[in-house]
């Protein structure tokens, strides 16, 4: 059971990362456009406090990748690593409580065969198989449709990339080796965001995603390549120049998806993180490693930190 919960937790992370990269276009404004050229590592400074750092991550890394010497050296100067979520939170007594809560969130009153329909369920399993996934959705499982959608959207093999060498994983491994303090921002909170999607809109969204899966994966692969080349400008240009990221959804649902992607997935969570982030920064030198999509835009962490009196500037590794 524990293994399943951890796998699903990583699924949440990866799906959010890929989706958020698409919704950055909604959060950008010209006055912040230069930030997107500043790269993925930022220095946080305020007089009277030790310097901390903000790192934009993705959850997929090149196969065989290791943490760069520059980031290893940076960690040596820091006391705490803040991440979106951490497997340690899912261990012991606390982990059992979280697993029970997660099981309750995932549960549905009817099986997938009924909630999704046989044709849609078969199409989702075919897509999973074509994408190299070992997961198959079971028609008799009383699983919430939004969880099935998350599995469909994330569990595939991206050529040349793996979650085992994602920058967030490499940072965690290095921090654990150095016995740094590790603090997670969230556990189950993102799942509540997905649960709020109305079922009718979700089902139409699944159909649209199935019809556009090949194109979406190619765009995601290109964005990953930009990230691992360190080219934040090209990455953001790709997002900004792309056709409206909700254009493949039915017209009647596009306003909802815009509000959900920008408001629920990005803005609200960024704002909710700020008290915890500020508390950690005040306590001592801290590395904050979160999805790159959280950094930029008017409600991004760079701007939110500046509004609180911090100088946030690009750090060239």
Image (cartoon, grey):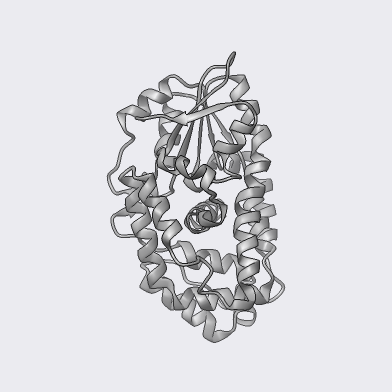
**In the drawing, does residue 4 fall left or right of residue 255?**
left
**Residue 237 drawn at (x, y percent):** 40, 54
Seen as rendered, the residue at the extreme right is 109
Nearest the eye: 196 or 111: 196
**Residue 34 drawn at (x, y percent):** 45, 41
Task: Give the number of callouts.
Answer: 0
Nearest the eye: 96 or 177: 177
Q: Residue at x 44, y 74 (%)?
A: 212
Residue 110 visible in the displayed image: yes
**Residue 6 drawn at (x, y percent):** 53, 50
Residue 143 visible in the displayed image: no
Decide: is 113 above or below 219. Answer: below
Q: Residue at x 69, y 47 (%)?
A: 97
Seen as rendered, the residue at the extreme top is 48
Seen as rendered, the residue at the extreme bottom is 119
**In the drawing, does residue 213 fall left or right of residue 107?**
left
**Residue 170 drawn at (x, y percent):** 39, 38
**In the drawing, does residue 6 fall left or right of residue 170?**
right
Decide: is 317 above or below 270. Answer: above
Nearest the eye: 56 or 35: 35
Decide: is 35 above or below 176. Answer: below
Q: Quadrant of the C terminus?
A: top left
Q: Quadrant of the N terminus?
A: bottom right
Q: Residue at x 47, y 40 (%)?
A: 35
**In the drawing, does residue 243 fall left or right of residue 98?**
left
């Amino acid at each position: 059971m524990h293994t399943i919960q951890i796998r699903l937790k990583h699924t949440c992370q990866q799906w959010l990362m890929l989706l958020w990269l698409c919704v950055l276009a909604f959060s950008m404004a010209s006055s912040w456009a230069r930030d997107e050229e500043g790269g993925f590592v930022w220095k946080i400074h305020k007089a009277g406090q030790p310097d901390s750092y903000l790192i934009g991550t993705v959850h997929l890394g090149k196969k065989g990748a290791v943490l760069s010497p520059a980031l290893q050296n940076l960690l040596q100067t820091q006391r705490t690593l803040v991440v979106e979520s951490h497997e340690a939170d899912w261990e012991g007594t606390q982990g059992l409580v979280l697993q029970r809560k997660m099981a309750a969130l995932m549960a549905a009153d009817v099986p997938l065969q009924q909630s999704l329909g046989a044709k849609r369920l078969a199409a989702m399993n075919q897509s999973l198989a074509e994408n190299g996934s070992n997961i198959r959705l079971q028609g008799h499982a009383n699983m919430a449709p939004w969880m099935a959608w998350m599995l469909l959207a994330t569990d595939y093999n991206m050529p040349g990339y793996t979650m085992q060498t994602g920058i967030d994983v490499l940072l965690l491994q290095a921090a654990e080796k150095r016995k740094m303090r590790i603090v997670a921002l969230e556990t189950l909170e993102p799942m509540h965001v997905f649960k709020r999607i109305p079922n009718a809109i979700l089902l139409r969204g699944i159909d649209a995603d199935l019809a556009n899966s090949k194109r979406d994966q190619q765009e995601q692969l290109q964005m990953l390549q930009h990230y691992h080349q360190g080219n934040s400008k090209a990455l953001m240009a790709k997002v900004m120049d792309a056709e409206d990221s909700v254009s493949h959804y039915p017209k009647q649902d596009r306003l909802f998806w815009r509000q959900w992607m920008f408001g629920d997935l990005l803005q609200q969570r960024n704002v909710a993180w700020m008290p915890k982030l500020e508390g950690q920064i005040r306590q001592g030198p801290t590395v904050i490693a979160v999805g790159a999509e959280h950094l930029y835009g008017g409600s991004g962490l760079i701007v939110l930190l500046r509004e609180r009196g911090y100088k946030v500037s690009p750090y060239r590794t």
